[in-house]
Image: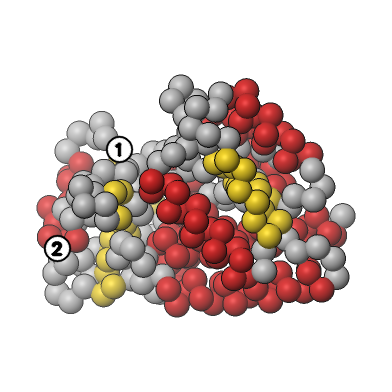
């Protein structure tokens, strides 16, 4: 079976074109949209991602302030920074980069981000709005998976989707978004007994557990679609996914590449969220 590459570059380019035009319209009548990017880590993969976000913002006419709190920052310091940026009318959007310092979890600090500026949808309020089907910002990576499937005309209505990963930033919100598309969703994780038995009967498998090579050909039914959300750094310093791509090709009808699949769409959606937040703020 030929396995189609579910690339995200074309979709990301279309989203970025719209975002750039909307950012320019805002800047023509006032300040450019402004993103506060709060960083409290020295993780190399995170540094690469933060740099890519800043470059993307610059290309689209979005002002991006990196606030580096250091890898030893306390929960109190992070909360105070997020609260200050939430209260600052010059800031339209806030994103908190993970991982966080040892002993600090996203749950400890994310509630300090105002929901109307929470462009990556990580606060309890944002996640609650998503679960209730109400308007709010959703985690961009989860949204990117759904948008990528739609772009490649992968049907979701009535289909069985297995999501491997239960984090609050990808797996759980993705399940909610898929349910809204009328898919039947199974959420699997590291403690799922016989993971292959769960995933091999699914029409779509989404690997989002953060473990290199977790999903192999044995986990994928013939003709299924596989979306790889993983962004792991291997021993050679390369960014690789959660899917053992070589063993999946030839079984799956479609597979998203890493890099070049979900990643560019995630970045594009984050930038779109920043502009939407700015548009809403200007409309008040």
- Snapshot quadrant of residue 56: bottom right
Instruction: Report which residue position mark 2 lands on.
Output: 246
Crowd class of label 1 (few under 14; some 14 to 19; many from 20; radius 10 Å) = some
Q: Give the Cα separation between the discs numbered 2 and 1.
A: 22 Å
Residue plotted at (27% across, 69% down):
254
Q: Nearer the viewer, residue 4 or 241?
A: 241
Residue 203 in picture, x, y percent from top left: 28, 60
Residue plotted at (18% across, 55% down):
244
Residue plotted at (49% across, 60% down):
52
Q: Does the rendering let one see residue 215?
A: no
Q: Does the rendering let one see residue 237?
A: yes
Instruction: Report which residue position mark 1 lands on.
Output: 189
Q: Where the C terminus falls, by quadrant?
A: bottom right
Relative to residue 242, is residue 146 depicted above or below?
below
Dot in front, 2 or 1? 2
- Circles 2 and 1: CB atoms closer than 8 Å: no
- Snapshot quadrant of residue 26: bottom right
Q: Nearer the viewer, residue 28 or 19?
A: 28
Residue 162 in picture, x, y percent from top left: 32, 50
- Snapshot quadrant of residue 283: bottom right
Q: Going by the image, does 137 lie left or right of 181?
A: right
Q: Earlier in the sequence, mark 2 or mark 1?
A: 1
């Amino acid at each position: 079976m030929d396995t189609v590459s579910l690339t995200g570059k074309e979709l990301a380019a279309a989203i970025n074109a719209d975002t750039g035009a909307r950012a320019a319209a805002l800047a023509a009548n006032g300040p450019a949209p402004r993103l506060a990017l709060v960083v409290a880590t020295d993780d190399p993969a995170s540094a690469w991602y933060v740099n890519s976000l800043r470059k993307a913002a610059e290309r689209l006419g979005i002002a991006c302030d990196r606030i580096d709190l250091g890898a030893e920052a306390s929960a109190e310091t992070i909360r105070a920074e997020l609260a200050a940026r939430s209260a600052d009318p010059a800031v339209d959007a806030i994103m908190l980069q993970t991982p966080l310092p040892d002993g600090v979890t996203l749950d400890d600090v994310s509630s300090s981000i105002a929901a109307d500026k929470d462009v990556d949808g990580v606060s309890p309020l944002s996640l609650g709005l998503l679960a209730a089907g109400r308007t709010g910002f959703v985690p961009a990576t989860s949204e990117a998976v759904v948008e990528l499937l739609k772009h490649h005309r992968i049907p979701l209505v009535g289909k069985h989707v297995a999501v491997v990963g239960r984090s609050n930033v990808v797996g759980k919100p993705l399940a909610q978004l898929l349910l809204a598309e009328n898919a039947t969703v199974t959420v699997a994780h590291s403690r799922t007994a016989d993971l292959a038995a769960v995933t091999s009967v699914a029409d779509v498998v989404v690997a989002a557990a953060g473990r290199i090579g977790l999903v192999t050909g044995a986990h994928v039914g013939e003709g299924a679609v596989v979306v790889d959300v993983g962004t792991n750094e291997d021993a050679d310093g390369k960014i690789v996914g959660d899917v053992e791509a070589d063993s999946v090709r030839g079984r799956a009808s479609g597979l998203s590449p890493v890099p070049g699949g979900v990643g560019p769409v995630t970045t594009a959606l984050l930038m779109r969220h920043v502009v939407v937040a700015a548009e809403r703020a200007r409309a008040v």
